[in-house]
Amino acid sequence: APTVLIDSGEDDIINADEKDAGVTATIELPEGTDLTADSLVISINGGEPQTIKLSDATFDESGKVVVSIPASAIVDGTPVKVDAI
């Protein structure tokens, strides 16, 4: 299964400045993933699943998929959860 890391700075807390600047999650794909044919399904805070074709995905310099978390999904005092399959 993919591994998800929410980029929330060094303290695991998303503050107002980070929320305003935009928060992302990086998703490490399992070994053997076909970047030309496979897709990734993500859900933020249990919301509607979104399918991302890996051939259309954005990757960081380490080869992980980068997904933007909408500011509306970040609510003060509530954990943000990103699921990926």
Image (cartoon, rainbow, N blue to C red):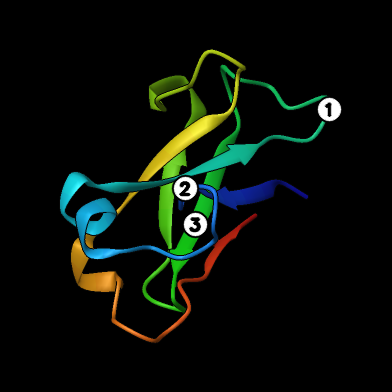
Mark 2: few/some/many CA within 10 Å (<14, 14-19, 20+) = few
Look at mark 1 in the image and give the residue it sits on: 31
Look at mark 3 in the image and give the residue it sits on: 42
Q: Is residue 72 left or right of residue 44?
A: left
Q: Quadrant of residue 12?
A: bottom right
Q: Secondary structure at mark 2?
A: loop
Q: Nearer the viewer, mark 1 or mark 2?
A: 2
Q: Residue at x 55, y 44 (%)?
A: 40
Q: Secondary structure at mark 3?
A: strand
Q: CA distance from mark 3 to mark 2?
A: 21 Å
Q: Residue at x 54, y 48 (%)?
A: 10
Q: CA distance from mark 1 to mark 3?
A: 18 Å
Three-letter amino acid code of the residue under disc 1: Glu
Numbered disc total: 3
Q: Nearer the viewer, mark 3 or mark 2?
A: 2
Q: Residue at x 22, y 64 (%)?
A: 16
Q: Secondary structure at mark 1?
A: loop
